[in-house]
Image (cartoon, rainbow, N blue to C red):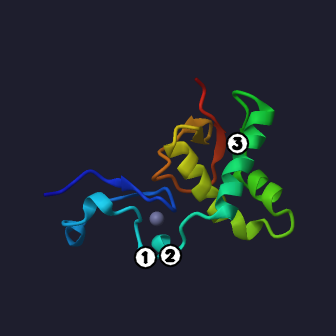
Amino acid sequence: MRREPKICATCGRSFEWRAKWADVWDAVRWCSVGCRRHRPGPLDAALERAILDLLGARGVGASICPAEAARRVQPDGWRPLMERTRRAARRLAHAGRIVITQRGRPVDPGRFRGPVRLRLLEP
Ligand SMILES: [Zn+2]
């Protein structure tokens, strides 16, 4: 029996039920072996905090580029953090903290591709 898709606890992308997970689906938290091996750690928590701090300082309605959060966490060498920053943004979006947008419109945090901006979820 097929089940609802889940959100990966590392990358924040949605992933589909697979037959090989039939007996353990309730316990599955990661989309891949890679994501299971790279669970979010202190650096990832720092990226989430940077996103929320930058947005909090800028106020409701304002947006940031994910690169701004990466630069805040690691000013020298922020580029390699970009994918991890997008992952942090996806996790925050799934948690109901922020909205991920493209051309000003919200996108599905589990499925978007390409450049995005981030803003606080307005109450
Ligand atoms: Zn994943």
Q: Is residue 74 above or below residue 52?
A: below
Marks 2 and 1: in contact by CB < 8 Å?
Answer: yes
Question: Which image quadrant: the C terminus?
Answer: top right
Specify the quadrant of the image occupied by residue 44: bottom right
Q: Residue furthest top?
A: 123
N-term mark: 2 or 3: 2
Give the residue at x 55% y 51%.
90
N-term mark: 1 or 3: 1
CA distance separating discs 1 and 2: 6 Å
The kind of residue tagged 1 is: Val
Residue, disc 1: 33
Give the residue at x 19% y 68%.
19
- Secondary structure of the residue carrying tag 1 is helix
Residue, disc 2: 37
Residue, disc 3: 52
Classify mark 3 as within 8 Å of ligand 1 or not, answering yes or no.
no
CA distance separating discs 1 and 3: 29 Å
- Secondary structure of the residue carrying tag 3 is helix
Q: Position of residue 86 (x, y in %)?
A: 61, 56
Specify the quadrant of the image occupied by residue 57: top right
- Disc 3 crowd rating (10 Å Cα; few below 14, some 14-19, many 20+) is many
The kind of residue tagged 2 is: Arg
- Secondary structure of the residue carrying tag 2 is helix
Marks 3 and 2: in contact by CB < 8 Å?
Answer: no
Q: Position of residue 21 (x, y in %)?
A: 24, 68
Q: Is residue 103 above or below residue 48?
A: above
The kind of residue tagged 3 is: Leu
CA distance separating discs 2 and 3: 26 Å
- Going by the image, does 37 lie left or right of 74? left
Q: Is residue 71 visible?
A: yes
Q: Position of residue 50 (x, y in %)?
A: 74, 49
Judging depth in this view, the residue of 112 and 96 nearest the camera is: 96
